[in-house]
Image (cartoon, rainbow, N blue to C red):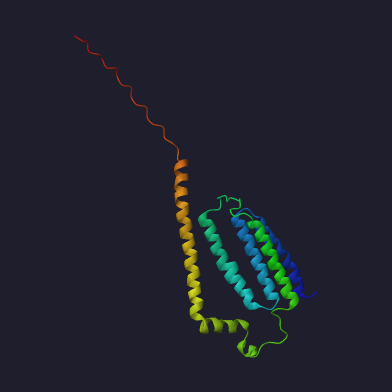
Amino acid sequence: MAADWIVFWVCAPISIGSAIAMLLQRNAVHAALFLIVNLFTVAVLYLVLGAPFLFAVQIIVYAGAIMVLFLFVIMLLGVDREERLVERLRGQRTAAILLGLGVVGEVVFAIRAGVGFSTRAPAGFGAANGGGNPQALGRLLFRAYFLPFEVTSILLMVAAVAAMVLARRRERPVASAERRAQEPIEPSEPSEPSEPREEEPVG
């Protein structure tokens, strides 16, 4: 058996198992850690398929930066808060299952129909990928599309910071009320008994 098949049969069960474990976890931190394992195994599969750029992006961007941001937000908002499992919208679980099955069906149909597959590369593909695919993507991103690329990264950063600020504003009144409820009530000092007043005789 070739080495790439050995790597595939080692990483594929770990990837599937970590994805299922992530869905079954009640702790948000444990779910995020299982997601990191899944992203690492998927990155190894990309490397086996001969896609070094996707391998690097999967580790640096997804398993690195985005998951660190997820853990930061989870630890900032708190991990001991219980979420209500009651559906706010009626039928959203059924709709989600139907949409998921629809996506799986579309992927299977696209693979069977050969959508997106071609036996011959388009004209100029070899010249555009001169020096390798990572170099070609780097030249394209940081030359022709440098400004949109940086603007998108700034927008994502602003959105993440704004989400954390709004979440902290909503949690602040609840946290202060819980803090006041947990403070022990100090017993009040007993007041000194007042001396009885003598009644003056009525003359």
Above-or-below relation of 117 to 174 = below
Residue lying at 69% horizontally and 66% vertically, measured from the top left: 102
Q: Is residue 129 left or right of residue 17?
A: left
Provide residue 62's location: percent of width, then percent of height.
Answer: 59, 68
The quadrant of the rendering that contains the C terminus is: top left
Above-or-below relation of 7 to 138 = above
The quadrant of the rendering that contains the N terminus is: bottom right
Residue farthest to the left? 203
Provide residue 108's location: percent of width, then percent of height.
Answer: 73, 71
Image quadrant where residue 29 sits = bottom right
Q: Is residue 174 left or right of residue 9?
A: left
Residue farthest to the front? 90
Camera-nearest residue between 43 and 151: 151
Residue farthest to the top? 203
Provide residue 151's location: percent of width, then percent of height.
Answer: 48, 75
Image quadrant where residue 192 sits = top left
Q: Is residue 1 left or right of residue 50?
A: right
Camera-nearest residue between 180 and 131: 180
Residue lying at 51% horizontally and 77% vertically, measured from the top left: 149
Above-or-below relation of 135 to 191 = below
Residue lying at 71% horizontally and 83% vertically, measured from the top left: 118
> How many marks do you count on the picture?
0
Residue farthest to the right? 1
